[in-house]
């Protein structure tokens, strides 16, 4: 009688370590490839002017100053690092998911790939909103709060440091639908709960948009508020589909047990 092969969840500890090692190796390979491609793209197509363009009107000659001789190279590497991580994130996420969820069926494994790709697209959308909307509005607001004793001189290091932080924050916010999808799949959140919190979500996101919008610019406030609150509504829709699918699976399991 043939001996049954152990399932991934029954693998010995050393086999788990070997599996983890190969997952890490594959993730690192994907990361280094994406970092190299991002650096080549950033350098070859000179994307720095594109990133400075949102605030070019606020600069004396449309250019940023820098005080460190290594600043241009450092900034280019930072941009390449962020872009490389974003591009490699679907592969890294897939490797992590394959290691932590070996009991998934083949169909479920196929579903997770587009979800991870969608997560990367959402992150990029958050970065785009930050670069072309939030950062210019924020810097304009800061320039409006001036004193006669102060003269603004925005350096490249300060600008890109601020931009990287805001981009990561907005990228994380735009992952809200993915987080809701996971929480709903785990049974920790339901569409009904999210629906009841709709007013709070609208109010909090509106107040936050008003705070960072200079003066009484209603259009600017709406430009910031609509995408953020729209994400919440989209998250409710995602939660509804996942919740409905989970109920169907549970009903099917109950019917099988009853037989």
Image (cartoon, rainbow, N blue to C red):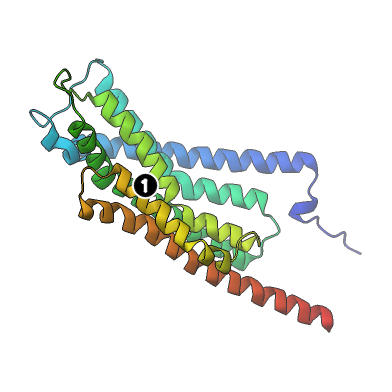
Vertical arrangement, residue 201 with respect to residue 165, above or below = below
Q: Nearer the viewer, residue 143 or 199?
A: 199
- SS of the residue at dot 1? helix
Quarter of the picture containing the N terminus is bottom right
Residue visible at 28% across and 24% down? 157
Point out residue 22 in the picture as x, y percentages from the top left corner: 62, 41
Q: Is residue 46 visible to the viewer in this orientation of the structure?
A: no
Vertical arrangement, residue 110 with respect to residue 27, above or below = below
Q: Nearer the viewer, residue 210 or 99?
A: 210
Point out residue 233 in the picture as x, y percentages from the top left corner: 43, 64
Q: Quadrant of residue 23?
A: top right
Residue visible at 77% across and 82% down? 255
Point out residue 177 in the picture as x, y percentages from the top left corner: 48, 58
Residue visible at 49% across and 60% down? 115
Q: Nearer the viewer, residue 20 or 89?
A: 89
Does residue 117 appear left or right of residue 129 in this picture? right
Vertical arrangement, residue 70 with respect to residue 5, above or below = above
Vertical arrangement, residue 195 with respect to residue 93, above or below = below
Q: Is residue 123 visible to the viewer in this orientation of the structure?
A: yes
Residue at the limit of the structure toward the right, as seen here: 1
Quarter of the picture containing the C terminus is bottom right
Q: Nearer the viewer, residue 229 or 78?
A: 229
Q: Quadrant of residue 213?
A: top left
Point out residue 228 in the picture as x, y percentages from the top left corner: 37, 55
Does residue 10 appear left or right of residue 109 in this picture? right
Q: Residues within 10 Å of mark 1 (few under 14, many from 20)?
A: few
Residue visible at 55% across and 61% down? 181
Label 1, on which residue?
208
Does residue 14 appear left or right of residue 64 in this picture? right
């Amino acid at each position: 009688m043939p001996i049954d092969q152990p399932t991934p969840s029954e693998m010995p500890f050393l086999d788990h370590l070997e599996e983890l090692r190969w997952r890490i190796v594959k993730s690192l390979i994907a990361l280094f490839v994406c970092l190299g491609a991002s650096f080549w793209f950033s350098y070859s197509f000179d994307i720095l002017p594109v990133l400075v363009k949102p605030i070019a009107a606020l600069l004396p000659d449309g250019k940023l100053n820098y005080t460190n001789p290594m600043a241009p190279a450092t900034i280019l590497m930072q941009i390449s690092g962020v872009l490389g991580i974003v591009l490699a994130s679907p592969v890294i996420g897939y490797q992590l998911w394959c290691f932590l969820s070996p009991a998934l069926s083949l169909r479920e494994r196929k579903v997770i790939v587009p979800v991870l790709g969608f997560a990367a697209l959402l992150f990029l959308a958050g970065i785009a909103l930050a670069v072309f909307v939030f950062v210019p509005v924020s810097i304009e607001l800061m320039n409006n709060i001036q004193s006669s004793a102060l003269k603004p001189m925005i350096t490249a290091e300060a600008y890109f440091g601020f931009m990287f932080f805001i981009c990561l924050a907005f990228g994380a916010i735009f992952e809200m639908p993915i987080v809701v999808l996971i929480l709903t799949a785990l049974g920790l959140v339901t569409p009904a709960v999210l629906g009841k919190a709709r007013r709070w979500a609208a109010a909090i996101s509106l107040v936050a948009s008003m705070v960072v919008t200079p003066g009484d610019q209603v259009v600017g406030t709406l430009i910031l508020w609509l995408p953020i609150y729209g994400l919440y509504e989209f998250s409710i829709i995602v939660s509804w589909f996942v919740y409905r699918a989970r109920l169907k699976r549970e009903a099917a399991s109950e019917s099988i047990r009853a037989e």
